[in-house]
Image (cartoon, rainbow, N blue to C red):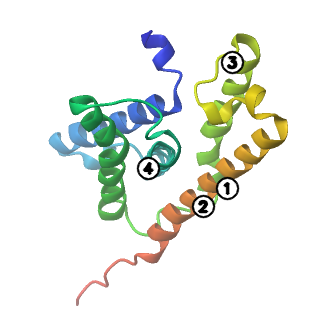
Amino acid sequence: ELFNMLGYFTIQSGLFVLAVFISLLINQLRGTPEKAFAPQVRGAALLYILITSIIFMVMLNGTFEAHGLNKAVLYINNLVTAVLLMIDNIISIRPQTYKWNLLLWWLIYPVVYLIFSIIEGIYSNQFRYYFLNFKELGLGYYIQVIILLVFVFVIIGSFIIFINKIFRPKPESE
């Protein structure tokens, strides 16, 4: 059951964000914040958790029953963590750190996940997300979904890089 849960992009991106937060916390407490995950890795974590949040709110929210603490945890996991990581990116990552070629690097993991989901679907007939079920959607609709997902990843990734580029360091006073 636990191993099965680890196959979800949502869980994987949440664990990635958790690793980033732990790294930030430990290195801050040690007085070595520069040894935390590199900004490029933190940007990737932000992209993945933002995508997870968007998919949760737009496509998955309301497809299952959650009440009380379960519902609170879902929203914290899918929204609050994204906001916190966004704040970290804006406040603590030096302006102009992100380069446009990061987009290609950041897309490697989602493409690998897509390949994993295709292989898993073919061999086990298991589809973790209904919108990745090419057997039920049909190939034409499935390809449209994939194009839309790639577009959303590129747009959100570009937005992260753009925000980092527009903030200029404050000029030092003489």
Q: Tell us which disc is closer to us: 4 or 2.
A: 2
Name the residue type under label 4: Leu
User: Which residue in the structure is indicated by mark 1?
Assistant: 151
Nearest to N terminus: mark 4 or mark 2? 4
Nearest to N terminus: mark 1 or mark 4? 4
Residue 89 against residue 127 in the figure, above or below: below
Name the residue type under label 3: Glu
The reply to whether the C-beta atoms of the residues labelled 1 and 4 are less than 8 Å apart is no
Nearest to N terminus: mark 3 or mark 2? 3
Q: Give residue 23's position: percent from left, percent from top.
A: 30, 37
Nearest to N terminus: mark 3 or mark 1? 3
Q: Tell us which disc is closer to us: 3 or 4.
A: 3
Question: How many other residues sit within 10 Å of disc 2, few (<14), some (14-19) or many (≥20)?
Answer: some
Q: Which mark is residue 155?
A: 2
Residue at x-position 63% and y-position 45%: 107
Question: How many other residues sit within 10 Å of disc 3, few (<14), some (14-19) or many (≥20)?
Answer: some
Q: Give residue 95's position: percent from left, percent from top.
A: 41, 69
Q: Which mark is residue 120?
A: 3
Question: How many other residues sit within 10 Å of disc 4, few (<14), some (14-19) or many (≥20)?
Answer: many
Report helix, strand or loop for mark 1.
helix
